[in-house]
Image (cartoon, rainbow, N blue to C red):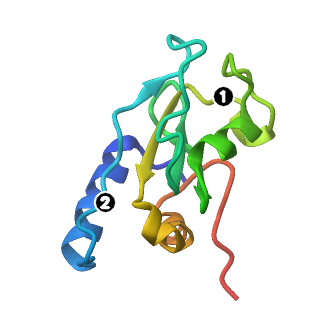
């Protein structure tokens, strides 16, 4: 089974926005942050809740995670300030994108993460049915 790509993610977000109307508007992914070029860059969507996605150098999705409080604190647990991996899920990460959410709907982050995991193939995480 091959890993899902950034294109797969974009199509899935489009499908989500069509199928699941939300009072706070559509969800979107942020532009890819190339962490190999952006040493000491600020965490994407630093102070917002949401979902973060790690991709390898071929832009295949390696990991999907959620942050119910703020994405910056979750990324700080996975990388140091120079983007050196601090967790197994971070190894091989070349790009990061996020799906930021308004603060008042922080509770949607786990649901969106699970939706993505049910529909995409990653290297490091899976949804367990049962």
Q: Tell me the residue at 74%/25% (across/down).
A: 80
- Looking at the image, residue 9 lies above or below residue 41: below
Say left or right for 86 vs 5: right
What numbered label is drawn on residue 113? Answer: none
- Looking at the image, residue 52 lies above or below residue 66: above
Q: Tell me the residue at 61%/58% (across/down).
A: 69
Q: Nearer the viewer, mark 2 or mark 1?
A: 2
Tag 2 secondary structure: loop
Label 2 or label 1, whichever comes before in sequence order: 2
Closer to the camera in the image, 35 or 80 = 80
Q: Tell me the residue at 45%/49% (across/down).
A: 4
Q: Is residue 9 visible?
A: yes
Q: Position of residue 127 (x, y in %)?
A: 63, 71
Quarter of the image where one finds residue 24: bottom left
Q: Position of residue 99 (x, y in %)?
A: 42, 52
Q: How many marks?
A: 2
Q: Position of residue 59 (x, y in %)?
A: 44, 33
Q: Are marks 2 and 1 in contact (CB under 8 Å)?
A: no
Quadrant location, the C terminus: bottom right
Quarter of the image where one finds residue 67: bottom right
Local packing at callout 2 (Cα closer than 10 Å; few below 14, some 14-19, many 20+) is some
Quadrant location, the N terminus: bottom right
Q: Tell me the CA gap for discs 2 and 1.
A: 26 Å
Q: Which residue does the numbered mark 2 point to in the structure image? A: 27
Q: Which residue does the numbered mark 1 point to in the structure image? A: 92
Local packing at callout 1 (Cα closer than 10 Å; few below 14, some 14-19, many 20+) is few
Quarter of the image where one finds residue 65: bottom right
- Looking at the image, residue 44 lies above or below residue 116: above
Q: Position of residue 113 (x, y in %)?
A: 53, 64
Closer to the camera in the image, 92 or 31 = 31
């Amino acid at each position: 089974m091959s890993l899902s790509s950034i294109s797969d993610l974009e199509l899935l977000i489009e499908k989500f926005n069509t199928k699941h109307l939300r009072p706070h508007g559509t969800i979107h992914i942020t532009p890819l942050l190339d962490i190999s070029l952006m040493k000491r860059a600020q965490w994407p969507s630093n102070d917002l809740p949401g979902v973060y996605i790690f991709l390898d150098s071929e832009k295949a999705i390696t990991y999907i995670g959620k942050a119910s409080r703020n994405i910056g604190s979750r990324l700080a647990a996975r990388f140091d300030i120079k983007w050196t991996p601090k967790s197994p899920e971070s190894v091989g990460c070349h790009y990061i994108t996020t799906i930021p959410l308004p603060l008042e709907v922080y509770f949607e982050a786990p649901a969106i993460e699970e939706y993505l995991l049910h529909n995409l193939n990653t290297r490091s995480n899976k949804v367990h049915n049962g």
